[in-house]
Amino acid sequence: MPDKVKNSKIARSFGKSSNSYDSSARLQRYSGQQILSFLPEEEQLTVVDLGSGTGFFSHIMVQKFDAVFAVDLSEDMLEFARQHRDERIRWFHADMHHLPFDDHSVDVVYSNLAVQWSSNFAALLEEVHRVLKPGGRFIFTTLLDGTLNELKQAWSVVDCDKHVNDFKSLEHIESDINNSCFSVNSLVQHPLRLDYHSVKHLACELKGLGANHVADKSRKGLSGRHAWLNMVNAYEAICVDNSSIVATYQLCLAHLTKPLTSKA
């Protein structure tokens, strides 16, 4: 699938969830909080929130930093954010691989659970490196292989179609970073287990986040009720715990620096 078409589908998926996103965003809140400590102490900085969504963390950062630029692929998300967040934030509708900023113009690029939607992580690293000043930081979270493994396992009992997105391994992420011009301050895998009342609760939360778009899914439309019920039964057999189910997310927490002597 061409990247432009794929990106458009992802943007629509997240755009549809703009009004429900914040109420469904336990995972996003948690992961974004984990990397706030990586932000510099200095206040007179320009910070880009890459994949800003509803602007929750843009709003937090603009209380401290001089300039916060929020970038998102979804126009609906940006419109929601404009209406609900601090008016000092500047909003940009752009693809993460083609940022609307000059070379060496940004102090920090912060990105919470957006990098996993990149069709070319190595190219994304190059683009972020381009806009950062020497000594600038790229601080991000992303999802890793093993995320929603329980859901993937449950669907595998039902059919061979793809119902859950695949994510890169930490080793793959690390390899791309090592081949880039960044230096690594911190790069860790952080497992997180969240409880849900039911499989339906999990599915509704994923839909509310706009994360129900599955790349390269062979069958179109919703799975039939019979298949859904079989999946639910399989899921409950895997991981019911005290009348709830769990879903595991494998988070990557990354803190990179553009070297002062970088030539690019």
Image (cartoon, rainbow, N blue to C red):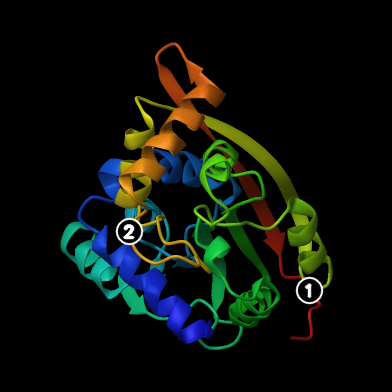
> How many numbered marks, from 0 up?
2
How much space separates mark 2 and mark 1, taking CA atoms? 29 Å
Whether 237 is drawn above or below 77: the answer is above
Farthest top residue? 242
Q: Name above or below for residue 104 compared with residue 188.
A: below
Q: Answer yes or no: is residue 49 visible.
A: yes
Mark 2: amino acid: Gly
Left or right relative to 199: residue 252: right
Looking at the rendered image, the quarter that the C terminus falls into is bottom right
The amino acid type of the residue labelled 1 equals Ser
Q: Position of residue 116 (x, y in %)?
A: 57, 61
Could you say which quadrant of the image residue 232 lies in? top left
Q: Which residue is mark 2?
A: 55
Q: Which mark is residue 113?
A: none
| Disc 1, SS | loop
Q: Residues within 10 Å of mark 1 (few under 14, many from 20)?
A: some
Q: Closer to the N terminus: mark 2 or mark 1? A: 2
Residue at x 53% of width, y 86% of height = 2
Write the residue at 55% across / 42% down.
148
Q: Quadrant of residue 19?
A: bottom left
Label 2: element kind: loop
Name the residue rendered at 51%, 60% in the picture. 111
Picture coordinates of residue 158, whole percent (x, y):
51, 43
Q: What residue sits 52% from the left and 52% below the top?
A: 164
The residue tagged 1 is: 180
Task: Tell me where residue 140 appears, x and y as whole percent.
Answer: 58, 56
Side of 79 where 39 appears, left or right: right
Neighbourhood count class around disc 2 (C-alpha, 10 Å): few under 14, some 14–19, many 20 upward = many
x and y, in percent, of residue 146 in the image: 65, 44
